Image: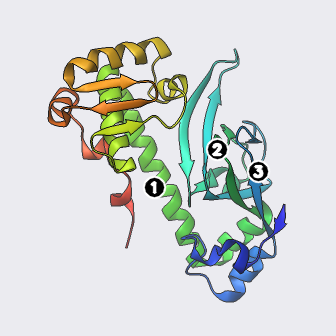
Amino acid sequence: MDTVTDRDAAPENLPLLRGLSEARRAGLLANAVVHGVAAGTILFEQGDVPNFQLVVLSGSAQLFGRSAEGREVLIEAVRAPDLIIPAAVVTGAPYLMQARVPEPSRLLLIHAAAFRAAVETDPVLAHSVIGSLAQQFRRMVRQVKNLKLRSSTQRVGCYILALSQRQGTPDRIVLPYEKNLIASELGITRESFSRALSSLEKSGIKVQGQTIAILDRMRLAAECKPDPLIDGTGDDDLVP
């Protein structure tokens, strides 16, 4: 771990800290470190009580839920510059998910007690945390709607369309991680994911390993019916 300085991590550019007074920001950073982690690192287990508020500076973290029988599903991916499960940190409650890092990443770790104390006394920081919680809540609502209102094939097709928009490549996507993880995030099995891809090849896609070519975007959209209230990037949730 490295001690945080403004020059090393530029934390004042994080949405979380941008509006704080110099004194408040300095106080939080005095109780923080920047930590670089390798792919595959487990940040915490479900059931652990938070010691830090983690903020993704670069890279991402995946949040997994696990049953008592050991079945594991991917719930969500958290990307820079978002906070990782601030609800658990603010309440001091155990994490409901495990966090793993799928790629080399850098995190800002703020001591949980110092973070809670600052949220309680600084309305600007409290507003930032409420904004983060609101965005995460809306992402979860989108996910629930996606799972409950669509067939598995529609979920996969809309995932392809949304990912192509996020990657800025309207005619293709590169799957960001293993197909079994994407399947679990979409609430289906690996086999169902493969069947959905095969079915969608009739609707304008071609699968080549981790790359999927979108040959007929309009036909794919007509088949899967993307909805901005489900598939939106979340930018519309931001308060100016």
Q: Is residue 163 left or right of residue 40?
A: left
Q: Residue at image x 26%, y 46%?
A: 228
The foreground one among 148 and 201 is: 201
The circle drawn on residue 135 is: 1
- Mark 1 lies on a secondary structure that is helix
Q: Residue at image x 27%, y 26%?
A: 205
The quarter holding residue 231 reads top left
Q: Amino acid at mark 2?
A: Glu
Pointer 1 with pointer 2, Cβ within 8 A: no
- Lower position in the chain sequence, tag 2 or tag 3: 3
Residue 65, percent from left and from top: 62, 30
Q: Residue at image x 67%, y 52%?
A: 105
- Mark 2 lies on a secondary structure that is loop
Q: In what quadrant of the picture does the N terminus appear?
A: bottom right
Name the residue that disc number 3 marks. 50
- Using the image, determine if residue 236 lies above or below residue 214: below
The quarter holding residue 8 reads bottom right
Q: CA distance from mark 1 to mark 3?
A: 21 Å
- Lower position in the chain sequence, tag 1 or tag 2: 2
- Lower position in the chain sequence, tag 1 or tag 3: 3
